[in-house]
Amino acid sequence: MSLRRRLSVALTAEDLAGARVETAAVAVIDVLRATSTLVQAFASGAAEAVPAATPEAARRLRGTSGDALLCGERNRVRIPGFDLGNSPLEFTPERVAGKRLILATTNGSRTLLGVARAPLAVAAAFVNAGAAAARLLAADRDVLLACSGDSGRPCPEDTLLAGCLLARLREGDPGARPEGPGAAAALALWDASGGRVAPFLAGTPAGGDLVRLGLEGDLAFCAAVDRLAAVPELRPGTATVLPGRSGIR
């Protein structure tokens, strides 16, 4: 950028109310597990994904489109009657290639809907951190990292990824300027973690829930930094997610 790029972090979906969504390149973050799952879905060949705020809204969106898959969770468990839950391991090419997905998760779907007015919005996770950072830098705009949090509270795993992305953005653009308390908190957490993502995720409340549910495989998947190069993007002016740039690194 010709001027110093500003980097900011919203620690919860609710914090987006005062953010500069309309002018920024936005990364939506829900590490455990919505954005990790979206990255895997598009790496597996999904055609598009549409977020829904509630299970009822998801069912209405599917309507008569019989080939759309209902995907989502409540309390980390697949919604009754849905085709898939929110486990990235479910989103294989055999299940989702060429399919339209309707995604209703507790937190990530709401964040995706909240940034629909952004000129660029991508889904970011540890599994595509490098590719997502590169896409944000290529947009030549200020960057907003939109963490989903959990029911209005910051999530340590989302904050950690925001710190990781900030570090990578600064590597790619040394003149970029982190600003605000959210960015300061994210960078401090990333520095304190020493980049040890897997043990950090395992020690979070959400990580503990996944272990108790027997979903250790999800936890390992979500901690695999730079495993994929898919960067799902929202169609400008809508909440429809499209493949963007994809492929295995």
Image (cartoon, rainbow, N blue to C red):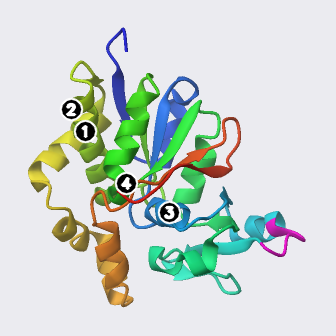
Q: Distance between the residues labelled 1 and 2?
A: 5 Å
Of the two numbered discs 4 and 3 in the rendering, the one whose residue sits closer to the viewer: 3
Mark with earlier residue (3, 2): 3
Mark with earlier residue (1, 4): 4
Q: Which secondary structure class fits the magenta region best?
A: loop
How crowded pointer 1 is (Cα within 10 Å; few <14, some 14-19, many 20+) is rated as some
Q: Distance between the residues labelled 1 and 4?
A: 12 Å
Question: What is the secondary structure assignment of the residue under circle 3?
Answer: helix
Q: Is residue 145 left or right of residue 55?
A: left
Tell me if label 1 and label 2 are in contact, CB under 8 Å.
Answer: yes
Span highlighted in magenta in the image = 62-67
Q: Position of residue 133 (x, y in %)?
A: 35, 40
Question: What is the secondary structure assignment of the residue under circle 1?
Answer: helix
The structure residue drawn at horizontal position 25% and vertical position 67%, both measured from the top left corner, is 201
The residue indicated by pointer 4 is 128
Please check the rendered image and state whether residue 64 is part of the magenta-colored stretch, yes or no: yes
Tell me if label 2 and label 4 are in contact, CB under 8 Å.
Answer: no
The residue indicated by pointer 1 is 168
The structure residue drawn at horizontal position 70% and vertical position 74%, both measured from the top left corner, is 70
